[in-house]
Amino acid sequence: MGDRWQVEVDRGVCIGSGMCVNHAPDGFVLDSARQSHPRSPQSDASEPVLTAAEGCPVEAIMITLAVTGEPVFPPEE
Protein backbone atom coordinates (compact mmCIF):
# COMPACT_ATOMS: atom_id res chain seq x y z
CA MET A 1 0.00 0.00 0.00
CA GLY A 2 2.87 2.41 0.77
CA ASP A 3 0.86 5.21 2.43
CA ARG A 4 0.97 6.42 6.02
CA TRP A 5 -2.33 6.39 7.88
CA GLN A 6 -3.70 8.38 10.79
CA VAL A 7 -5.77 5.94 12.87
CA GLU A 8 -8.31 7.12 15.44
CA VAL A 9 -10.87 5.37 17.62
CA ASP A 10 -13.96 7.24 18.80
CA ARG A 11 -14.05 6.02 22.38
CA GLY A 12 -17.52 7.49 22.80
CA VAL A 13 -18.71 4.97 20.23
CA CYS A 14 -16.39 2.01 20.98
CA ILE A 15 -18.18 -0.85 22.74
CA GLY A 16 -15.03 -2.85 23.50
CA SER A 17 -15.88 -5.84 21.32
CA GLY A 18 -12.18 -6.53 20.74
CA MET A 19 -12.70 -7.28 17.06
CA CYS A 20 -10.02 -4.74 16.14
CA VAL A 21 -7.46 -6.46 18.37
CA ASN A 22 -8.38 -9.83 16.88
CA HIS A 23 -7.92 -8.55 13.31
CA ALA A 24 -4.89 -6.31 13.94
CA PRO A 25 -3.14 -7.06 17.25
CA ASP A 26 -0.16 -4.96 16.14
CA GLY A 27 -2.48 -2.03 15.42
CA PHE A 28 -4.85 -1.90 18.40
CA VAL A 29 -4.96 -2.52 22.13
CA LEU A 30 -7.80 -2.51 24.66
CA ASP A 31 -7.31 -0.56 27.89
CA SER A 32 -8.55 -1.65 31.32
CA ALA A 33 -12.00 -0.22 30.50
CA ARG A 34 -12.06 -2.32 27.29
CA GLN A 35 -11.79 0.79 25.12
CA SER A 36 -9.78 0.42 21.93
CA HIS A 37 -6.73 2.55 21.20
CA PRO A 38 -4.43 2.51 18.18
CA ARG A 39 -0.98 1.35 19.27
CA SER A 40 0.38 4.30 17.31
CA PRO A 41 -1.62 7.27 15.99
CA GLN A 42 0.21 6.98 12.65
CA SER A 43 1.22 3.77 10.97
CA ASP A 44 2.05 2.32 7.61
CA ALA A 45 -1.02 1.34 5.64
CA SER A 46 -1.87 -2.28 6.34
CA GLU A 47 -4.55 -4.72 5.36
CA PRO A 48 -5.12 -5.94 8.96
CA VAL A 49 -5.80 -2.38 10.22
CA LEU A 50 -8.22 -1.75 7.35
CA THR A 51 -9.93 -5.10 8.04
CA ALA A 52 -10.25 -4.14 11.71
CA ALA A 53 -11.89 -0.83 10.80
CA GLU A 54 -14.25 -2.50 8.34
CA GLY A 55 -15.14 -5.17 10.91
CA CYS A 56 -15.82 -2.83 13.83
CA PRO A 57 -19.47 -3.48 14.74
CA VAL A 58 -20.09 0.19 15.60
CA GLU A 59 -17.73 1.82 13.05
CA ALA A 60 -15.68 3.49 15.79
CA ILE A 61 -12.41 3.37 13.80
CA MET A 62 -11.50 6.14 11.39
CA ILE A 63 -8.51 5.99 9.03
CA THR A 64 -7.24 8.94 7.02
CA LEU A 65 -4.16 9.48 4.90
CA ALA A 66 -1.60 11.06 7.23
CA VAL A 67 -0.33 13.55 4.64
CA THR A 68 -3.59 14.80 3.16
CA GLY A 69 -6.29 13.88 5.69
CA GLU A 70 -8.23 12.16 2.89
CA PRO A 71 -10.57 9.49 4.31
CA VAL A 72 -9.60 5.86 3.85
CA PHE A 73 -12.30 4.41 6.11
CA PRO A 74 -15.11 5.04 6.33
CA PRO A 75 -15.06 6.18 2.72
CA GLU A 76 -16.75 9.43 1.81
CA GLU A 77 -20.19 8.82 0.36
Image (cartoon, grey):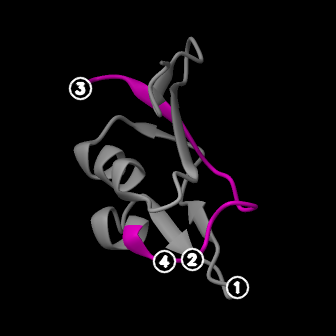
Residue to which mark 4 is pinned:
17
Q: Are marks 2 and 4 in contact (CB under 8 Å)?
A: yes
Q: Which residue is mark 2?
A: 16
Q: Residue at x 68, y 53 (%)?
A: 10
- Residue reaching furthest bottom? 32
Left or right of 70 in this view: 50? left
Front-most of 25 and 11? 11
By secondary structure, the bulk of the magenta-drawn segment is best described as loop
Q: How many marks?
A: 4
Question: Can you say whether 48 is above or below 26 in the image?
Answer: above
Q: Are marks 1 and 2 in contact (CB under 8 Å)?
A: yes
Residue type at mark 4: give it.
Ser
Q: Earlier in the sequence, mark 1 or mark 3?
A: 3
> Could you give the CA–CA distance between mark 1 and mark 3, rounded to whole angstroms?
33 Å
Q: Position of residue 8 (x, y in %)?
A: 61, 46
Badge 3: residue crowd in 10 Å (few <14, some 14–19, many ≥20): few
Q: Could you tell me residue 63's position as x and y percent?
A: 50, 36
Q: Which residues are magenta?
A: 1-19
**Residue 39 sits above or below residue 35 on the image:** above
Residue 29 is inside the magenta segment:
no
Apparent side of residue 48 relative to residue 43 in the rendered image (left or right):
left
- On the rendered structure, is 73 left or right of 69? left
As helix, strand or loop, the secondary structure at mark 3 comes to loop
Indicate the amino acid at tag 2: Gly
Q: Earlier in the sequence, mark 1 or mark 4?
A: 4
Q: Nearer the viewer, mark 3 or mark 2?
A: 2
Quote the CA–CA distance across marks 1 and 4: 11 Å
Q: Amino acid at mark 3?
A: Met
Q: Which of the marked residues, 4 or 3, is nearer the chain's N terminus? A: 3
Q: Is residue 41 placed above or below 60 in the rendered structure? A: above
Mark 3–mark 2 Cα distance, whole angstroms, equals 28 Å
Asked if the magenta segment contains residue 3, the reply would be yes
